[in-house]
Amino acid sequence: MPVPGRKPKPALQVVREGNPGHRPVREGVKVPPSELTEPDWADVFPVVKVPAKPRAPRGADDEELKEYRREVEAWQRVKLASEAADFSRAVAAREWARVVPLLQMAAGLSAVDRSTAVDYCLCVARLEWCERRLSVEGLISMGQRGPCRNPLTTIATQYRTQLKAYIGELGLSPSSRGRIAPPEGGDPDDDSVFD
C-alpha cells in the first residue's frame, strides 16, 4: 500500500540541498538481529527431468500425426520449464548473494523479512528469464489471427510492477533508502557519508 504524501528525498540529496524545514528524521521499527539463511533454490525452482523427445511415427495417418504434434508440444513445454528452472536458480542465488548481505547491514534485514527477500530474488530471476525469452522470440508472435504481442511482455510487466514494490519495501532505490533507518550498533562516525 502506498504511503501518503511525497516520497522523501535520498539522504545525499538532502545534504546537498539542505533541510530548510529542519524536519526530524523518522525512526524506524527495531527488529532484533538474527541470521538470515538462503533458501534452497532447488526447492523454489524444482529440477525438472526432461523425457526423451517423441519420435515421429512412420507412415502415420492424420490422427497419429496430430497426437505426435501434441506430444512434441508437451515435450517442448517441459524442456522450456527445465531451462527456466535452471536459469532461475542461478539468477536467484546470485541476486541473494549480491543484495541480502548489504540489506542485513544497512537496513537491518532479519529472519522476519526472509519471505520478502526470497520473493524479491524470485521476481528478479523470473523477470530476467522473461526478458531473455523475449530477446530470443521477439516482441511479436504469431497468434491464431496473425501477428500479436508476445504474451511474455504481459508477464514481464507484471513482474516489473511487483519488483518495484519489493524495491520500495527493501530500500533498494535512492528515494526509498531515505525512509529506512539503519540498525543501531557500531560507531556512527565509521564510514559516514556525511563526513
Image (cartoon, rainbow, N blue to C red):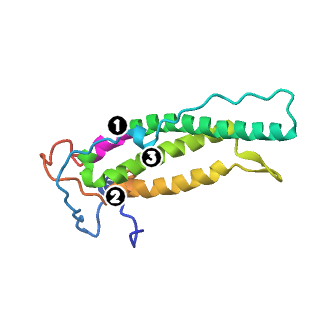
Q: Is residue 49 magenta?
A: no
Amino acid bearing label 3: Leu
Q: Nearer the viewer, mark 2 or mark 1?
A: 1
Asked whether, in this view, residue 190 is left or right of residue 119, the answer is: left
Amino acid bearing label 2: Glu
Q: Earlier in the sequence, mark 2 or mark 1?
A: 2
Mark 1, residue position: 97
Q: Nearer the viewer, mark 3 or mark 1?
A: 3
Looking at this view, is 20 or 29 the one in front?
29
Question: Image height check: is 8 above or below 102?
Answer: below
Question: Image height check: is 4 above or below 34?
Answer: below
Q: CA distance from mark 3 to mark 1?
A: 13 Å
Q: Residue at x 65, y 36 (%)?
A: 75
Q: Which residues are magenta?
A: 95-103
Q: Main secondary structure of the magenta part?
A: helix
Q: Residue at x 87, y 36 (%)?
A: 61
Answer whether residue 10 is visible to the viewer in this image: no
Asked whether, in this view, residue 120 is left or right of residue 82, the answer is: left
Q: In terms of image quadrants, where is residue 82? A: top right
Query: Counting other residues with Cα less than 10 Å from the Cα at mark 1, is it few (<14), some (14-19), or many (20 or more)?
Result: few
Query: Counting other residues with Cα less than 10 Å from the Cα at mark 3, is it few (<14), some (14-19), or many (20 or more)?
Result: many
Looking at this view, is 181 or 109 the one in front?
109
Q: Which mark is residue 17?
A: 2
Q: In terms of image quadrants, where is residue 141? A: top right
Q: Residue at x 67, y 29 (%)?
A: 53
Residue 67 point in image, percent of width and height: 77, 40
Q: Residue at x 87, y 39 (%)?
A: 62
Please tell me whether mark 2 sits on a helix, a strand or a loop.
helix
In the rendered view of the protein, which quadrant contains the N terminus? bottom left
Residue 58 point in image, percent of width and height: 83, 26
Amino acid bearing label 1: Ala
Mark 3, residue position: 122
